[in-house]
Each structure stands twice: as C-alpha cells, then as structure tokens.
Image (spheres, rainbow, N blue to C red):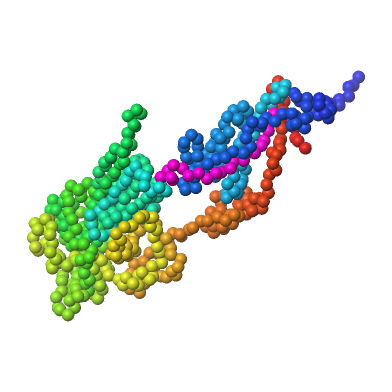
Amino acid sequence: MEYMTESVTCTPGHILCCDCGVPISPNPANICVACLRSKVDISQGIPKQVSISFCKQCQRYFQPPGTWIQCALESRELLALCLKKIKAPLSKVRLVDASFVWTEPHSKRLKVKLTIQKEVMNGAILQQVFVVDYVVQPQMCGDCHRVEAKDFWKAVVQVRQKTLHKKTFYYLEQLILKYGMHQNTLRIKEIHDGLDFYYSSKQHAQKMVEFLQCTVPTRYKASQRLISQDIHSNTYNYKSTFSVEIVPICKDNVVCLSSKLAQSLGNMNQICVCIRVTSVIHLIDPNTLQVADIDGNTFWSHLFNSLCHPRQLEEFIVMDCSIVRDLKRSAGAGMISKKHTLGEVWVQKTSEMNTDKQYFCRTHLGHLLNPGDLVLGFDLANCNLNDEHVNKMKSDRIPDVVLIKKSYDRTKRQRRRNWKLKELAKERENMDADNERQYQDFLEDLEEDEAIRKNVNIYRDSTIPVESDTDDEGAPRISLAEMLEDLHISQDATGEEVLTLLQLFGTKSIISSRYANKLKNSSARGSKKNGAGVPIESLRITSRANERYFFLKGS
C-alpha cells in the first residue's frame, strides 16, 4: 500500500471580535483594533503640548530647577531635555523610541515622536506612536539679565602696559578674537593704559589670565574684596580683581640690556632692537645679527627699558650700502638670524639735506636697503639717553644711529590695502588722536612680518579690487591666499541662503540629502498643519505567554 504524500498547509484560524463581531486573527485581547482604539488610550495623561524656555541672547535652554544648558537643534541633549519635561507621565508607561520631527527653525516649535508600550487587558501589551509638540517660549536667563544691566560683575581683569605705543594691545586683541576669549565677558572697557575685562564668575577671569600668560610676557597680582556674607549659611560674596602687567617693550623699540644679561645671551651687544613681541621678547643685535628670546621671568629679573619712543623716529636717506660677507664671531656667540642680512650703510637725515653731515652704522636691514631708499631710525648721537645701563657703557660701544625699518608711502599702502581686521566691541574713553596712526603702524607690521600674521585672522575686503602682491615701490603686501572670507550667514524662511552657501564652499556633504530637500521645501512643509487629534499610527499586541506578536493596523 502506498501513501500519498501531500503538502499540508496550515491556515490560521479566525475568531470574531467580542464587541463588534468582525473576523480577526486570535490575540490575547480577542478584540479588533477599532474597538481597542475606542476603549484604551495608553497615552492618556501624557501632555501633547509642552512649553520650553529659551534665551535668545546666549542661545540656551532652561533645565529646571535653575540650570541653563546649550543644546543644538535635534541633538541628543535637547531630546533628553524635552523628555525630562514629561518625565512624570512617562513613568507610567514604557518608552520604546523617541525622535525629532523636522520643523522650520523660525517656527518656535519642537516636535518629538514618542513610541510607548503599556500592558492592557488580559496581559496584552499595546504599543502606540504619537507626537508631543513643544512650544519654545523666549525667556532671558539670569546671566543675560546681568549683562544687560551693565553694572554687575564678580571679577575683572585689568590689563596694563606702561608704554606709549599700543602695538602689543592690537596684537593681543586679534589673538583674543581668534581664540574666542571674549565670549564670556560682560563688557570690555578701553582706558588710556590698557583694557578692563569684566566677568560674571571668577573662573572665567582666571581662564583669561592664563591665556594672557601664554600669549604675551606678563605678570599679575590677584586681590578680592568682600561684598556681603551670610553668617547662617557661611557663604561669602567677593569681587575679584586681577591686575595683569605686560612688559613695557613693543616691536621696533631700541633697548639697552644689562651687561650681565647680555653676556648670558651669548655675549651679544647691549644695544638691541626688538623685532617682535609674542609669548617672548625677540631681540636682534644690529651689529652682529645675533638673536635672543627673553621670556617674562627673565625680563622681570633683569629689567630694561626702551631708550626711545616711536615719536622719536626720524627719516633717513641711504647714501651708500654694502653687505658684510665675513663676520668674525666672538667666543660663545648665540644664534644668528637667517632672515636678515648684515649691512654697513651711510645715511643722512632728510631734514638735513642742506648739510653734508652723514652717519655711519651697521644694520640688520641689508637685504632691503639700496642707495636712495628712505629708512626710519633713532638718532642716538643727538639724543639725551637717561638709562642706567647706557650710562655704564663706553661711548664707542653706543652707535650713532639705529635703523629700524624701511619707509614706504603710507598713503599708497592704505589705498591698496585689500584686507581688514575685526575689532572687539569695547567701550572707549579719552580717545587719543594718535591711536589711528598707531593702528596703521600695526597694520604695516602685519604686512612686513609673516610670523605675526600666522596668529591673526585676516579678512579680505571685497570693496577693494585684488591686485598684485607687491606695488611699484616693492612694499610688502599680504597675499590673497592668507586671507579669509568674512561671511555673514543668515537664513530666510525657506533656508535657501544657507543651502546656497553650503553648495558654494563644497560643504554640502556635511548634511544629508534628505535634510537638504527639507531646506528647499520648508515653505511648503510649513503650510501643512497637523489636525487637532493625534491619530494612532500603528498598534502592536504581544502575548507574554507564548511570545507571539500580532500587528494590528488601523484603517
């Protein structure tokens, strides 16, 4: 006898809904989706609209009870903050998933799609998806209140430099802008001898002091004054003051070192020229091209001052210039500058052209000077030098003239300058007419010194056409490759301007194509509004007994 083998197909049985009698697949509740939807709403008690506070000044959100946090749109931090607003109702259900629903940035709305589960009748687990709408309400935080009041501060950093020129301050201002050290300041006040930075906390002031110590040679003193105290809670309210003093040496200053310090730096001459001030003082000997770096601790241990201030600079004309090829170095000599060339020049003051008086000197500008060029320098032979180190030197060791830099036509340089710098938003008082001339000197130093330009953000000025890197006189200029674009990013209702900016600079890859399409179609999306009721998108019933899943889709 042969048995016929046939494939046995199992078809699931159907039962009738206990309420409406519609045939359905068996499930623990024995009820259809429509009836279950009308009887059970597991999202009941969870608010569908919640308000959240946002400070427009500092771009922070309020986190109860008294904390303001920085959160980016659609970030994990912002999602956690939104869920904490409905933490109590969510404790009665199981949260499965939470994600943002895209909204227009200007709509003042945040939408979060939640997926929750809860056990209902007969041990069945019901899953439901709904959207919670968060209304962003503007509210100014306490820190911004104090900033707007303009009279509240807990710490102040007083930066001072006892010098007539502000080149170091202009350089320091650019460093502060580049590294964003001005973001925590309540206000910045400019006075005659320096700047005052006001802060709402002592920690921010200490961070600023540490930044200053890393960028320029300084020393500081800290003090505090008791404002109020609470003897019951043992709390004290202080106002702290940090007095920071920058070394009184600027670029292009002529200094006279002590004999002990000059000997420790490689037996260099005592009369030196300051070519740069960064985290250390960079000096060069115009007679031997020997260079040395002096940090803040060394300066305060062996004090020296500037012999001449910038207003004493005089204009000379080069009569003859010759390059010194072979230079005998003394024993123990230090490093020699490779960027400069030693030259012997005969110069004459432009104010004494009707005489035949000329001066002979050595200079570190041999690679720049030619007969007939104009050069700026200090006349030490006819200057009254009041310095203790100079008084101890022999007269034959003091040069007659110290040349500082080559002179160019300032008017032409200003007209062809196709770049600009940003400035700090500071309060000014007792403005000096000489400040503009000092600022132009600083801009010229940036054009001449590449080492300083590396630490400064230089922006292209679109109002001036781009020309060659050097003009007819050979004055140094900043190349276009060293400039940055000064961007002002703004966004309209459709987000078109942001998308165009991303495509322009090739950074569209940082956003997904889906988000780019949302930016393009944001205006169309904004016109569509959800209905008053939040429909249930999907329901899932799970049986704990045999781990069988039944997916019920609503009509």
**Coordinates of residue 57 in the picture (x, y in percent):** 47, 48
**Coordinates of residue 158 in the picture (x, y in percent):** 29, 49
Number of marks present in the image shown: 0
In front: 131, or 451? 131
Choose top left, top right, bottom left or bottom right for residue 200: top left
Name the side, left or right, on which 129 lies relative to 252: right
Identify whether 36 is placed above or below 148: above
Outermost residue on the right side: it is: 1
Q: Is residue 122 visible?
A: yes
Quadrant in which the N terminus is drawn = top right
The magenta-colored residue range is 126-146
Name the side, left or right, on which 308 lies relative to 90: left
**Coordinates of residue 516 in the picture (x, y in percent):** 60, 52
In front: 348, or 147? 147
Identify whether 111 is placed above or below 365: above
Residue 2 magenta-drawn? no
Identify whether 49 is placed above or below 304: above
Residue at the spot 37% in from the left edge and 50% down from the top edge = 187
Quadrant in which the C terminus is drawn = top right
Name the side, left or right, on which 19 lies relative to 337: right
Q: Main secondary structure of the magenta part?
A: strand
Residue at the spot 41% in from the left edge and 70% down from the top edge = 468
Q: Is residue 343 visible?
A: no
